[in-house]
Image (tube, rainbow, N blue to C red):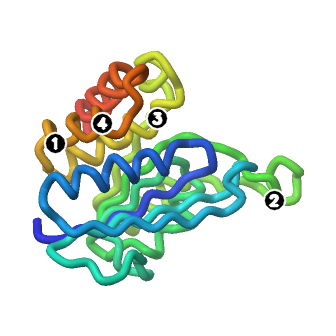
Amino acid sequence: MDKLNIMIVGVGGQGTLLASRILGNVAMKMSFDVKVSEVHGMAQRGGSVVTYVKFAKKVYSPLIEKGEADILLAFEKLEALRWVEFLKEDGSIIINKQRIDPVPVILGKEKYPEEIVEKINKVFDKTVAVDALPIARECGNIKAVNVVLLGVLARITGIDKSIWLESIKEVVPQKIQELNIKAFEAGFNVEV
């Protein structure tokens, strides 16, 4: 692997920013030039949050344009649908099956789309759908969904697992490291 463009998309409060910091640390450990760019919607109110993580020998721009993402890591189904046009034709998409209703749906002004994963899977052969919430709950905390999904990402990228574990230890506060390592391992071992 000489370069990788990854978009992490989710809803405010899902830990997308921590995930991007861990991923950026992984890339630096592999001696890549890394650019991370965070785009916040109304994150504090459950709005859309997008992070671009690009790494290569030399990265000139932190942004990923439509059709340029090698991997789309979606922490929520609707966010996967919202950002799927950024994925390359032969790109991989990891979708957390979790549903978080946006404000227009909560207010009854819009309906949550049906069969999101199935629709995306018809267009993209490399679609992996994971129900990360119950896995995180089993590990001890539902907030570990982000690291469960990083475990799935690690497996798909083929980047050495030990590099990921080192990065988690460096980025995650010590008091929750054990939980996050357990969540990462659970995600890494999910059948894909």
Give the structural element (helix, strand or loop) at label 1.
helix
Q: CA distance from mark 4 to mark 1?
A: 9 Å
Quadrant assignment, res 39: bottom right
Cα distance between the residues tagged 1 and 3 = 20 Å
Residue type of the residue flagged with mark 1: Ile
Quadrant in the picture for the N terminus: bottom left
Residue placed under numbered mark 4 in the picture: 168
**Closer mark to the observer between disc 3 and disc 2:** 3
Residue found at x 63% / y 59%? 48
Disc 1 designates what residue?
163
Q: Residue at x 31, y 56 (%)?
A: 24
Q: Position of residue 12 (x, y in %)?
A: 63, 49
Query: Circle 3 sits on which residue?
Result: 145
User: Picture coordinates of residue 110 (x, y %)?
Assistant: 81, 59
Q: Earlier in the sequence, mark 4 or mark 2?
A: 2
Residue type beneath disc 2: Glu
